[in-house]
Image (cartoon, grey):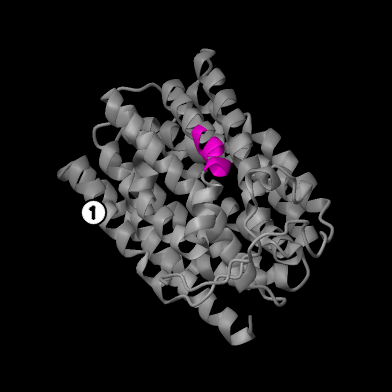
Amino acid sequence: MTIDQQGRQFRLLTTHCVLSSLALSLAGGFIGAYLLQLGFSVAAALTINGILLAIRCAMRTALLPAIRSLGAGRALLVGRALMALQFLPLVHADRPAWLIAWVLTVSMGECIYWPICHAAYAVSGGGGRRGWQIALRQIACTGVSVGGPMIGGQILTRIGASAEFELATILGLLSATPLLWMNHLDLGPIPTLRQSMRLSDNIGLLAFAGDGWMSAGLGIAWPMVLFSSLGSSFDALGWASSVAALAGALAGLGCGIAIDRGHRATLTRAVTAALILSVVMRLASGWTPWAAFAANAFGSAVGGAYYPVLMSMIYDRAKRSGSAYHFHLAAEVGWDAGAIAGCMASAAVACSGLPSVFVTLPSVLGIMLIHYCIRSDRPVGSVLAVRDQVVSEPVAG
């Protein structure tokens, strides 16, 4: 792929990411809070998320024949469509049949979409500007990430969940349109079922496992705690999420520039310390809603700085591997495994009788694993031992 082709792919992917972020920020950040409003406890909601992740993990290999048949381009479109449609059954998730439909829809959509999406970003960027490219994507998504939660909170409060989730579904489907103009996705071979079991990169898998474990506490459990701390108000949660999105984007921009200047090692130490501090602030935030609001903003600023540090390493390793799709397929399995364990750990804390803010405490283990992996980053092999068809076809073809 030429430099010009890579630039075109990157711009189309970034446009898709912006539109997709609008749908996700409008409704995705309210899923945990909505489950609480339907009557689920924090422990029950975390357990449901753990089951969802286990199903998603199992589906990754089960759906490989379908992905090989469709090709990466069409599979990316199918995965994004399923992710958009997840919001329709979620409206009635208090009924077992609809809850199961939601779990199956989002599991199938995400297990198809995310490995292909990450692999596409891996092969469409780099060239010494990886940190800037990741930060640019964060900045491009800032407007919708800031406005989306405010609008979503208003709709949920004043109109209702049906209107909120139907709008998110429409926007999610529309976000797939830039993908139709992408010419080729050269993601390397799509492995068979047996080949998919072969580890492509231990460091990448473990780093994503740590990220999944951390995300279970800070990305899944914490928003539920924040929702309760803010008086179970969707409006207040929307404002808190908007402020957090702005803080995260600004931090990510500075971090991305620093990575391209060769400061990732220094940033890794600083970000690790800041992530642990963000957990401490969340633990200490139970006494007032304003403390929870401040802890959430600080945590998102740190998360915005952390994301380029992790993903610049992951994308560079995926591109060097020669099989970006296989790399990310294995890495996503690691993420699922870490997130399942993290959800169960946080659910156990929620059942222990400790204050609800302590569900974020297990995240520290994930943070330490991520730190180890980034510090251990070394070049991976140039080509994986997978001899199957190379994906290189028009997305819409």
Check if residue 372 falls in the magenta segment: no
**Residue 241, position in %: x, y?**
40, 49
Furthest-top residue in this view: 353
Q: Residue at x 78, y 46 (%)?
A: 202
Q: Which residue is mark 1?
A: 167
Quarter of the image with the C terminus in it: bottom left
Give the class, few, some or many, for how many residues have Cα within 10 Å of label 1's Cα (few <14, many ≥20).
Answer: some
Q: Nearer the viewer, residue 119 or 383?
A: 383
Check if residue 59 falls in the magenta segment: yes
Say whether residue 23 is left or right of residue 3: left
**Residue 123, position in %: x, y?**
63, 70
**Residue 206, position in %: x, y?**
73, 43
Furthest-left residue in this view: 159
Q: Residue at x 68, y 37 (%)?
A: 366
The prevailing secondary structure element of the residues shown in magenta is helix
Residue 286 in view in this figure: no
